[in-house]
Image (tube, rainbow, N blue to C red):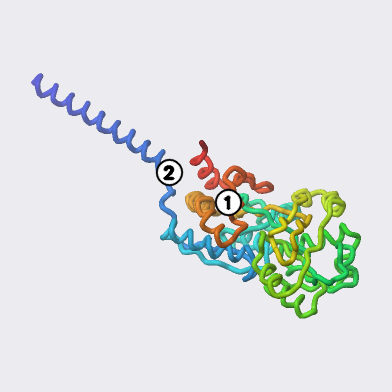
Amino acid sequence: MLPAALSRIGRRRSFRAGAALVVVLGLLLWWLFPLGDSTPSGTLSFSTGVRSGVYQRYGERLKGALAKDLPDVSVQLQTSEGSQQNIARVAAGKADFTIATTDAVATYLRDGKPGAERLRGCVRLYDDYIQLVVDRGSEIRKVADLRGKKVAVGQQGSGVRLVADRLMTAAGLDPVNDVTAIPAGIDTMPKLLEEGRLDAFFWSGGLPTTAVADLSDRFAIRLVPLEDPLIKELQAAGGSTRYYRSAVMPADAYRNAQQGQAVPTVAVANVLVTTDRTDAAMTEAFTRTVIDSRDRIGREVHAAQLVDLRTAIYTDPLPLHEGAKRYYRSVKP
């Protein structure tokens, strides 16, 4: 009887040891591969911008990078009027990711628009530079000279519309009554100026913007300086205007237009935006591709070269998405 009892005890101990091992392995696997964090798959939409703008060109190349890194994810690009429309789309769940300027994001949050509390940041990207473009022979030398002129100010849902109105207000102009505001985008502004149907146009984009560079190659243009006093007046409004800063367009941004002269202007950062609805694993993978593809994309879209891992985490005024946090933790030295 004793040998049989000892055998039963041994089997029970072996069973308990085996069960304990299964629990330990299960906990280890759970820690390494949290539930719900499978390899990203499915379809996501990315709201970009007007067809010839930097957002669209960046989005097209990022889509190619994502196809290599996330072969089970289908990315659909949606053109848009720009930052304001982009934010509204993502907040409403009509797009999964987008790019927007921080001033436009801050304005959306300030106004408490639908879904504002769900917005999350992933990456601080590159800066947009405000560009006021005129015929080289124009009498317009400063923003205040736009009084009585035909000025393209961007489409209603664009980021450029937001900053153009603020710049004109800071210069003492009424954007509605003191200029003839044309709601055109960068896809049509250059041709309108070239044909004499505009006196000037505002643009907010990375350097160089292809549409502006192409215009300067075939038509004599000039960039109007946005001097410090104007920028201080702009910033004095407070709130979302604190995201504007003084900057300088390098002399070689548009060689033909600048003729060797650097141009003072206003800059504002862009952020990659999503919502708390987006899966953490998808967001982590998306963020990783944005950072890893910087140099590849930057060879064709120069603004992308300015994406920097050291500053990418600063997505103010938006909190970081949990998936983006995971990525930054994974690459922390």
Is 244 on the left or on the right of 318, as rendered? right
| Residue type, mark 1 in image | Asp
Q: Report the residue at 76% width, 70% height from top.
A: 221
Residue 51: quarter of image: bottom right
Residue 183: quarter of image: bottom right
Image x and y of residue 15, in percent: 22, 31
Q: Report the residue at 71% width, 55% height from top.
A: 250
Q: Secondary structure at mark 1?
A: loop
Distance from disc 1 to disc 2, alpha carbons, whole Å, reads: 18 Å
Image x and y of residue 52, in percent: 63, 70
Residue 157 is labelled as none
Q: Write down the residue under mark 2.
A: 34
- Answer whether residue 151 is visible to the viewer in this image: no
Residue 147: quarter of image: bottom right
Camera-nearest residue between 268 and 294 = 294
Q: Report the residue at 58% width, 68% height from top.
A: 78
Image x and y of residue 150, in percent: 84, 74
Q: Secondary structure at mark 2?
A: loop
- Answer whether residue 233 is visible to the viewer in this image: yes
Q: Report the residue at 41% width, 38% height from top.
A: 31
Q: How many marks?
A: 2
Position of residue 102 relative to residue 144, above or below, is above
Residue 276 is labelled as 1
Q: Residues within 10 Å of mark 1 (few under 14, many from 20)?
A: some
| Residue type, mark 2 in image | Pro
Q: N-terminal of the two: label 1 or label 2?
A: 2
